[in-house]
Image (spheres, rainbow, N blue to C red):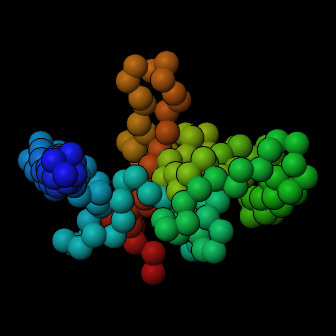
Amino acid sequence: MNYIRSSLVLLLLMTLVTGVGYPLLVTALGQSLFPAQASGSLVYRQGKPVGSELIGQAFSRNGYFQGRPSATSDSAYNTMASGGSNLAVSNPALDKAVSQNVAAWQQRHGDNDAVPVDLVTASASGLDPHISVDAAVYQAGLVAKARGLSLDQVVQLINRYTYTPRPAFIGTSVVNVVELNMALDQLKPLP
């Protein structure tokens, strides 16, 4: 009987420590040391949250930079359905999807130039907010034309929002599409 009592006491104690105490401690530390990150790295416009630095969004209107294709199944950038497509390179469905994406970009761009790979393939999570600098520059002419801006203005904005990981050998420079599009709206809003 004693072993049942001690087992129940240990169960209750560990439930309180790991189920209540530890989560409260981690939440308190996160909120006090890293308040923006602990709250989801939200991006605000006029005091209202409009997105996150960590999650891509669908920008379908001309005049906005487009992110990577979303791999979420039911609707683009659905955070509840996060996950990659899990299609192997040898899978014909992946080849078909990439070919369709390339054709769509070439039609939109009006040429048969090579399309940056991150504009035609989904990221591992399906929610990546970043694109390569090449992908942003590839779209710069379309965005400049739709916004009535010079190409130089748009390229300067891309350069301002380019992030290079430290140390640099970790990865290539990227641009956060959500932040870049918000900066475009500040520079010259779409009608």
Along the line of sight, the residue nearer the viewer: 85 or 77 = 85
Q: Is residue 8 visible?
A: yes
Rendered location of residue 59, percent (x, y): 54, 68
Rendered location of residue 190, percent (x, y): 45, 75
Rendered location of residue 35, percent (x, y): 16, 51
- The quadrant holding residue 69 is bottom right
Against 66, residue 134 (above or below) is: above
On the picture, is 8 further left or further right than 152?
left
Along the line of sight, the residue nearer the viewer: 8 or 15 = 8
Query: Number of marks in the image?
Result: 0
Quarter that holds the C terminus: bottom left
Along the line of sight, the residue nearer the viewer: 86 or 118 = 86
Residue furthest bottom as drawn: 191
- The quadrant holding residue 55 is bottom left
Rendered location of residue 94, percent (x, y): 82, 52
Residue furthest front as drawn: 1
Name the residue: 60% across, 47% down: 124
On the picture, is 94 further left or further right than 139?
right
Name the residue: 41% across, 29% down: 165
Q: Is residue 143 visible?
A: no
Against 81, residue 130 (above or below) is: above
On the picture, is 113 further left or further right than 172?
right
Against 143, residue 191 (above or below) is: below
On the picture, is 8 further left or further right than 51?
left
